[in-house]
Image (cartoon, helix red, strand yellow):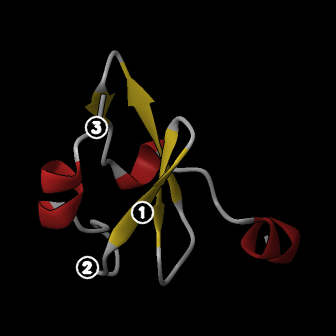
Amino acid sequence: MITNELLDILACPLCKMDVRLEGERIICTKCGRRYPIKDDIPIMLIDEAELPEELKKEN
């Protein structure tokens, strides 16, 4: 389980903005990238992130 204390210190590795927890993903509040959580460990790697729908359509 991801605690609020952990969320408070995490930031998006790409744009350095705050993140929020949404289901089994950590979502950047600016760029919208979705970082997975595996075995209660956030995988905060840019290459592992899912792009938001708007960016998927552009690429």
Query: Disc 2 residue type?
Result: Lys
Above or below residue 10? Residue 3 is above
Mark 2–mark 1 CB contact (< 8 Å)? no
**Residue 52: image location, x then y, percent:** 69, 65
Apparent side of residue 15 relative to residue 30 in the rendered image (left or right): left
Mark 2, secondary structure of its residue: loop
Mark 3, secondary structure of its residue: loop
**Residue 53: image location, x then y, percent:** 80, 65
Residue at (32% x, 38% y) in the render: 43
Residue under label 1: 20
- Per the model, the C-alpha gap separating discs 2 and 1 is 13 Å
> Which one is in front in this view, the residue at disc 3 or the one at disc 2?
3
Quarter that holds the C terminus: bottom right
User: How many residues crowd around disc 2 within 10 Å: few (fewer than 14), some, or many (20 or more)?
Assistant: few
Outermost residue, top side: 39
Apparent side of residue 7 relative to residue 15 in the rendered image (left or right): left
Above or below residue 23? Residue 53 is below
- Per the model, the C-alpha gap separating discs 3 and 2 is 19 Å
Residue at (24% x, 57% y) in the render: 7
**Residue 21: image location, x then y, percent:** 44, 53
**Residue 4: image location, x then y, percent:** 22, 53
Where is residue 34, by image quadrant? Answer: bottom right
Q: Which mark is residue 16?
A: 2
Query: Disc 1 residue type?
Result: Arg
Q: Which mark is residue 2?
A: 3
